[in-house]
Image: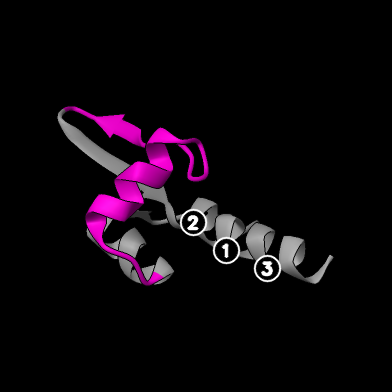
Amino acid sequence: MSAIHIDPLIRDRDAAGMLGCSKATFWRRVADGTIPKPVKIGGMSRWPQSEITEVIERVKSEREG
């Protein structure tokens, strides 16, 4: 039996906190395509935590490369 991996969905304020920026800056980065668009559930906007982690890893690798 294989384990199911759950990728938590996080709010904009939590994602902004991971990135160390304000919610306003976070939404500007969504608008300019730096951060993926949210998953919409009804009127809620959420991001898979792994996508925010991928953004962090991508910019780290661009800095190092």
Residue contact at pointers 1 and 3, CB within 8 angstroms:
yes
Q: Is residue 65 left or right of residue 61?
A: right
Instruction: Determine whether label 2 and label 1 are within 8 Å by CB.
Output: yes
Q: Is residue 21 magenta?
A: yes
Q: Residue at x 40, y 40 (%)?
A: 30
Residue 4 in sight from this viewpoint? no
Q: Which residues are magenta?
A: 20-42
> Label 1 sits on what residue type?
Ile
- Give me the residue at 35% from left, 60% from top: 15
Kindly report the distance in space between the C-alpha atoms of the residues bearing marks 3 and 2. Answer: 13 Å
For the residue marked with disc 2, what is the amino acid?
Ile
- Residue 54 vs 41, above or below: the answer is below
Mark-to-mark CA distance, 1 and 3: 6 Å
Q: Which residue is mark 3?
A: 60
Q: Is residue 6 magenta?
A: no
Name the residue carrying label 2: 52
> Can residue 26 be seen by looking at this rendering?
yes
Quadrant assignment, res 57: bottom right
Specify whether 58 is left or right of 33: right
User: Is residue 51 shown left or right of residue 64?
Assistant: left
Residue at image location 68% in from the left, 68% down from the top? 60
Q: Which residue is mark 1?
A: 56
Q: How far from the left and from the top, in percent, is residue 65?
A: 84, 65
Q: Are marks 3 and 2 in contact (CB under 8 Å)?
A: no
Q: Nearer the viewer, mark 3 or mark 2?
A: 3
Q: Which of these two is toward me, 24 or 37?
A: 24
Give the crowd class for mark 1: few <14, some 14-19, many >=20 residues within 10 Å: some
